[in-house]
Image (spheres, rainbow, N blue to C red):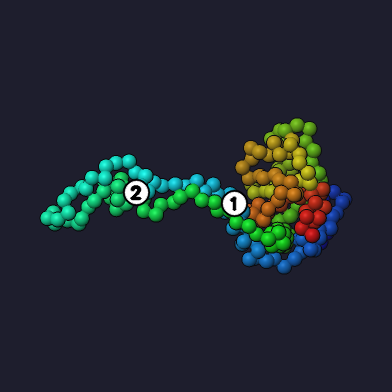
Amino acid sequence: MEVKVFDAKGKATSKKVTLSDTVFGIEPNDHAIYLDVKQHLANRRQGTHKAKERNEIAGSTKKLKKQKGTGGARAGSAKSGTRVGGGRIFGPRPRNYHFKLNVKLKRLARKSAFSYQAKNDGILILEDLNFDAAKTKDFVALVSALKLDNEKILLILGSKNDNVYLSSRNLGRVKVVTADSVNTYDVLNAKKVVLAESSLEVIEKILN
């Protein structure tokens, strides 16, 4: 698949690049995508949730009323989970939600995500960026030139570039990552995936 390369002013250049069919043209595997996204979201969870149980509540263990003769149900400790102010019955405890997936499956999921974006015309190739300084207005000008003002964008760079990253950090709809750290969730969560020229080689090398 041949696609045009755009410059920072949003204009198509005379250059064209060929997207690898083994990465951008496969038959997407929905189940692989599901598992990879599920793992990504699970691994983001802190798992620090905690509720006090009966043995952790401060208070007296004195029996509230006599066992018989009141006409009501039996009542013991005020810490009982059935009473207001009592402990939570089987409440949440701190836990680790992380789980592992095979490397081949994660590669398949990323290939599937890129293939979906390619099918839906969601991929744009951009000449490598090199900002002189970290200025948000420069990145906003780039987004406007590409006519992506109100779109959710994922910009994938070939290598780390602090000026580009810092320029985009204040923009809520933009995420900048390097080609070696891109994940399935981010690719599918974006309306437009903008690939720097140098990132193509890295992505194809990792996923193949």
At x 39% / y 46%, what residue is drawn?
A: 52
On the image, the x and y values in percent for residue 169 come to: 66, 38
The quarter of the image holding the N terminus is: bottom right
The circle on residue 43 is 1
On the image, the x and y values in percent for residue 43 come to: 59, 51
The image shows residue 50, relative to residue 18, as above or below, that is above
CB under 8 Å between discs 1 and 2: no
Q: Nearer the viewer, residue 150 or 18?
A: 18
Q: Residue furthest top?
A: 133
The circle on residue 54 is 2
The quarter of the image holding the C terminus is: bottom right
Disc with the residue nearer the chain's start (1 vs 2): 1
Instruction: Please name the amino acid that badge 2 sits on.
Output: Arg
Q: Secondary structure at mark 1?
A: helix
Q: Is residue 149 visible?
A: no
Q: CA distance from mark 1 to mark 2?
A: 30 Å
